[in-house]
Image (cartoon, rainbow, N blue to C red):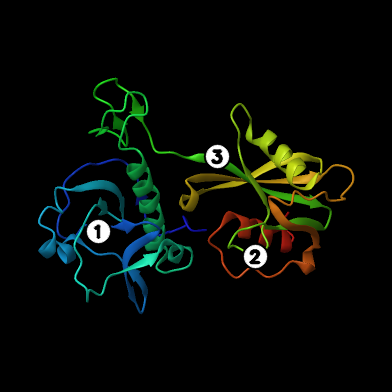
């Protein structure tokens, strides 16, 4: 999956130390990121690549994280040369580009970029928020409000019935491939309750024997995904929520389409069932 970057090591401890010329500079505009395409995949600019046109770049940045001891920073308004080898690319590139550890860095930086962009002012009193010096947090100096990065819990659900699994396609989304049922956890709800509720709402089925499989940080949507398998309880006749799904159908193991990408928890769970591991 996208976060599986071994043998590289991701260190998200907050260390707001100044960058040096070899530090990575992460720059985003809308849904795009500044990268260079190479024969081996993608590269991010380092501060030395941007310093000539950006005198304040070393002071106007925010520490993000480290990978293999190399520091990554979020940079703000920058000037770029028109003929620069670094170009703005859609963040969807991070689903499949190599090396994987740089794709993971790119999408994780993008999640933090969105959080900082959307939380400039205190939601309680309206004052400007300030960076905390000790942890990844924004603080209001007037009322003391503390704001932490947003992480939304959600479930991926493999509904099984013997040798078959329920697969679906989303309605009204650009992603057109088969997926598993999914949904966000609501206030006052356990993740197991989310599983049962989402299955009932989206396909009108009851489930039992809900069991946890694995989790995945999914920075494309500020989400912490939690994967569950569960068994059909009763009739397998589907009542489709057409606002959420374009279709849902049962697949025998040998009928499941081969998955070519391995960045997501959904695809891993599908192939795990196809290969008889569930």
Is the residue marked by circle 1 packed among few (<14), some (14-19), or many (20+) residues within 10 Å?
many
- State the quadrant of the C terminus: bottom right
The reply to whether residue 8 is visible in this rendering is no
Query: Residue 96: x, y in percent?
Result: 48, 67
Which labelled disc corresponds to residue 177? 2
Query: Residue 220: x, y in percent?
Result: 47, 53
Mark pair 3, 2: CA separation: 23 Å
The reply to whether residue 181 is visible in this rendering is yes
Which labelled disc corresponds to residue 24? 1
Residue indicated by mark 3: 153
Q: Nearer the viewer, mark 3 or mark 2?
A: 2
Which labelled disc corresponds to residue 249? none
Report which quarter residue 165 is drawn in. bottom right
* Labels in figure, total: 3
Mark 3 touches mark 1? (CB < 8 Å): no
Is the residue marked by circle 3 packed among few (<14), some (14-19), or many (20+) residues within 10 Å?
some
Q: Give the mark nearest the N terminus, 3 or 2.
A: 3
Question: Is 278 left, or right, of 81 in this rendering?
Answer: right
- Residue situated furthest bottom in the rendering: 39
Mark pair 3, 1: CA separation: 29 Å
User: What is the secondary structure assignment of the residue under circle 1?
Assistant: strand
Vertical relation: 143 (above or below) 232: above
């Amino acid at each position: 999956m996208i976060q599986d970057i071994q043998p590289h090591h991701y260190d998200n401890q907050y260390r707001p130390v100044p960058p040096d010329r070899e530090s990575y500079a992460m720059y985003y505009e809308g849904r795009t990121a500044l990268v260079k395409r190479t024969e081996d995949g993608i590269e991010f600019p380092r501060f030395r690549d941007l310093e000539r046109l950006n005198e304040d770049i070393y002071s106007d940045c925010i520490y993000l994280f480290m990978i293999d001891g190399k520091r990554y920073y979020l940079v703000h308004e920058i000037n770029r040369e028109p003929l620069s080898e670094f170009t703005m690319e859609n963040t969807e590139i991070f689903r499949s580009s190599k090396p994987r550890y740089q794709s993971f860095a790119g999408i994780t930086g993008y999640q933090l970029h969105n959080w900082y962009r959307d939380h400039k002012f205190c939601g309680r009193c309206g004052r400007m928020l300030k960076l905390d010096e000790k942890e990844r947090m924004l603080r209001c100096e007037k009322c003391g409000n503390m704001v932490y990065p947003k992480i939304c819990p959600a479930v991926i659900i493999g509904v099984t019935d013997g040798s078959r699994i329920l697969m679906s396609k989303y309605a009204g989304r650009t992603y057109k491939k088969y997926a598993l049922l999914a949904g966000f956890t609501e206030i006052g709800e356990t993740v197991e309750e989310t599983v049962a509720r989402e299955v009932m709402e989206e396909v009108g089925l009851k489930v039992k024997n809900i069991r946890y499989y694995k989790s995945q940080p999914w920075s494309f949507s500020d989400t912490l995904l939690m994967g569950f398998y569960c068994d059909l309880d009763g009739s397998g006749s589907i009542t489709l929520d057409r606002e959420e799904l374009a279709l849902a159908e049962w697949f025998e193991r040998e009928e499941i389409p081969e998955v070519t990408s391995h960045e997501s928890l959904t695809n891993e769970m599908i192939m795990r069932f196809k290969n008889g591991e569930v």
